[in-house]
Image: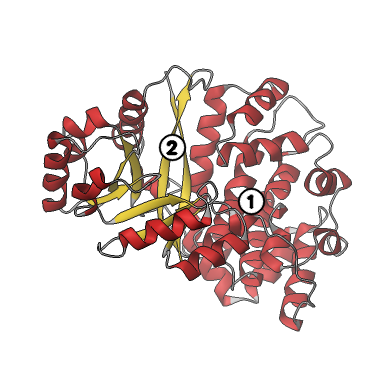
Amino acid sequence: MDQFIARQPIFTAYLKVHAYELLYRGKGNYSLGNVTGDRATTSLLSSTFLTKDIKDISSFKPCYINFTQELLEKRLPLSFPSTTVVVEILESVQPTEKVISCCKLLKEAGYTLALDDFVYDRRLIPLLELVDVVKIDFRLTPLDAIHRTLHHLARYKVKLLAEKVETQHEFESANKLGFTLFQGFFFSKPEQIKIKELTANKITHMNLLAEVARKNTTIDRLHQIIGNDVSVTYKLLKFLNSSYFYRLQEIKNLKHAIAYLGQKELRNFLMLVIISEMATEKPGELIRLGLVRAKFCELLAPEEDESIDSSELFLVGLFSLLDVMLDQPIDKLFNSLPLNKTVKDAIILGLGPYADYLELAKSYEQQRESRFLPILERLQVSNEMVNQSYMTALRYANGLIL
């Protein structure tokens, strides 16, 4: 039976992706209630290293993976590459002799060690002398407790990682306190949107985006847009020659590329390039997340339901973060784009036939099982299809690192 996993990015202070934490999502009906920590980790490791290509999931970044007491004492992390796996020691792990011995071996073998959900306890000192990263829940831990914890940690050579950072204010506060790594959804959940005018360059891009988004645009018009920009041509060829496409022959010219992709995929590609150009000052993971959402929503479109347009679902996912990317109110941006009312309603109001697809993408990426399980039932989407679509969307996004 298929295993289901997801990932959550870990950022540097410069909003670059440092690593991903891989999270076990269960199997079958996604029920995690009866799954032990040991089973969750071993299933995740089996799926990512033995079944799937880890590069499809990790984008060549380190992967934080939770390890329980028993798995550490059995020295399981040593079976996996130190260049890929960051050993995350769960808060429930007791610093037994076996655990300390395993951690010393891991350290000597070049592994990175992290303490999860850290709360200071003198018994953890032997681990603090070995680990590289300490993770603190920034949302649930009172500020005075964080100060006390940081005081205790000052004597150890550890990096501080703030978990559950969900607003820009929390990110800035954690940064000032000395945290250098951050995990959460703050970059996609701004507390308020700054009302600022788009630059002339961005207005040009916005007009180009409007042209590409038109349903009645033509291949000739798209060819003209691409042909006038050497950078876009290069990115298109790079994308088509990425590992996402399994072809025997390399695509070497623009005419071949356009013929290979077709109008629908070409429009999608151009929209992504234009948006990424407009959001150059934003973290790259924000663009990646929008693309994963876009492809994920598109792949879930039912073939037999003509009222659901897969190309419009792609727009729903891709444009769901447009306000964050451009620091503009979403309704103002949408006034400039020729989008279907159904697409706008799904993003702005959370209403209409496309709203469930966007909410499914959001709740899946944020690990909110109680929210996405009812949506699966409403959409009559199988567990296998969700897992396959998510993995395909990740590979697609990896191929489009622009």
Asked if residue 122 is positioned above or below residue 29 in the image, the reply reads below
Name the residue tied to disc 1. 265
Q: Marks 2/1: CA distance?
A: 30 Å
- In-image side of 338 versus 186 (left or right): right
Residue depicted at 62% across the width and 57% down the height: 167
Q: Is residue 362 visible?
A: yes
Front disc: 2 or 1: 2
Is residue 14 something one can see in this rendering? no
- Helix, strand or loop at mark 2: strand
Query: What's under tag 1, amino acid-wise?
Result: Glu
Label 1, secondary structure: give it: helix
Q: Is residue 22 left or right of residue 200?
A: left
Point out residue 182 in the picture as x, y percentages from the top left corner: 47, 58
- Residue 301 sits above or below residue 338 on the image: above
Residue 356: % across, % down: 73, 34
Closer to the camera, 122 or 24? 122
**Does residue 53 sit above or below 69 in this rendering?**
below
- In this view, the residue in front, 206 or 170, is 170
Taking depth in this image into account, of 212 and 19 the one nearest to the observer is 19
Residue at the far bottom: name it.
200
Which label's residue is closer to the chain start, 2 or 1?
A: 2
Q: Which residue is mark 2?
A: 23
Q: Position of residue 389 (x, y in %)?
A: 55, 35
Q: Is residue 20 left or right of residue 370?
A: left
Location of residue 137 in the rendering, given as x and y in whole percent from the top left corner = 47, 48
What amino acid type should be assigned to the residue bearing mark 2? Leu
Looking at the rendered image, the quarter that the N terminus falls into is top left
